[in-house]
Amino acid sequence: MTSRNAASARTAAGRSVPARLYGIDAARGLALLGMMATHLLPTFESNADLTPTWIGLTFSGRAAALFAVLAGVGLALSTGKHKPLDGSDLSAARRGVALRALVIAAVGLSLGGLEVNLAIILVHYAVLFLCVLPFLGMQLKQLLGWAAGWILASPVLAYLLRPWLLAADPPLRLGHNPSWEDLATPTRLLADLFFTGYYPVFQWLSYLLVGLVVGRLMLNKRLVPWVLLIGGIIVAFLSKALGTAAMESWGGRAALERLLDSPGYPLHNVLQVNLTGIPQEGSWWWLASAAPHSATPLDLLHTSAVAAAVIGAFLLLGRLAEWVALDLLLPLRGAGAMTLTLYSVHVWVVSGFYLKPLPAGWTEDAMYFAQAASAVVVGIVFVLLKWRGPLEWLGHAANQVGRGGAKAIR
């Protein structure tokens, strides 16, 4: 093939790419596999020191945050890309997003009835969709201001409110995944979803705002993915370094260890992987850490920056795939295009082994790789056949009904 013909082929391949960017789906596929890894593989070694594993150091906090940031990106792309919709179009888009959120919430509440040893994100994810509705019509500069302000302020407000909510009798915390039964105690459910649960929506709204910012950028421009990649790496490094310095060099960890009054507790290792389960109250030093799942300003900033860098990297890989006329992202973008279905099936499968021994000959590693490979293969099949996942079809149908276009459901 001559260079001219090769260029023509690449151009044709580029024109065949739909408006939905393949790199975004691929990043979502990575987020899915990362979350599955934290569910199925140990994040700490089984020793007294709770030594972090590479899974915990790599994916804990970051995979779920990437998933949430990508939700914001997807909403931006579906509501006007770099220029938001307005007027009746914006109202219709908001109705569509709201109905889609209800579908996700219904799936999450149904899965919440299963007995599993993992935190299911779907109900929180749905509530985040509803909370972000007022921001869908904002311009890029407004979104930047809101995202920065929310990252800085929401953890402080949550820190002040959380002890009051937990001091109630009974404490306003579920202690389990939200399910249909919890609708009978709405105050407790809402407190858990927004402040006291595993994925506090109040702080996590930061991720969707960051995603809206990323999605409003002109992602097809040459320099934007590089800015996301390089800028994300720099901000992620600096925010993590600042959190580490606060804990290790400026006395933060020592102060928190005295507060916990638990000699020998490996707080240093816990701060590297997952702060969930430790009451973050009694000292402002908690807000100085960048620990995964702490939802502090530095944690939100670090994980948002990592998400931006990952998105930038996959957008660049998408360009490379277009240039070589080879779908390099297919394994991940297939799974990423149907994460609601694959995530739900994953949770259902995990529930089948709750408090039960693994089948003979199976290990945790084998269980993970079997599920990850299945997700990749199923995703490839669906994307090649141009099918939506079953739950994605329901979400799409709800979105179209909300927009007033029920006849467009396919």
Image (cartoon, helix red, strand yellow):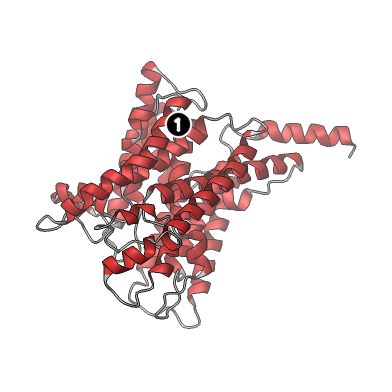
**Would you place residue 21 above or below residue 106 in this image?**
above
In this view of the protein, can residue 389 be seen by the observer?
Answer: no
Residue 18 x %, y %: 60, 33
Residue 400 x %, y %: 39, 30
Q: Residue extending furthest top?
A: 87
Q: Which residue is mark 1?
A: 144
- Residue at 75% across, 42% down: 325
- Residue at 41% across, 39% down: 208
Quadrant of the frame with the N terminus: top right
Taking the image as shown, residue 177 lies to the left or right of residue 12, namely: left
Residue 365 x %, y %: 52, 73
Question: Which is nearer the eye, 255 or 120?
Answer: 255
Taking the image as shown, residue 79 lies to the left or right of residue 194, namely: right
**Would you place residue 89 above or below residue 207 in this image?**
above
Question: Which is nearer the eye, 215 or 386?
Answer: 215
Q: Residue extending furthest front?
A: 250
**Would you place residue 17 above or below residue 317 in this image?**
above
In this view of the protein, can residue 100 be seen by the observer?
Answer: yes
Q: Residue extending furthest right?
A: 2
Q: Amino acid at mark 1?
A: Leu
Question: Which is nearer the eye, 13 or 198?
Answer: 198
- Residue at 58% across, 52% down: 332
Q: Examine the image and state in which quarter residue 144 appears.
A: top left
Number of marks in picture: 1
Q: Secondary structure at mark 1?
A: helix
Taking the image as shown, residue 22 lies to the left or right of residue 169, namely: right
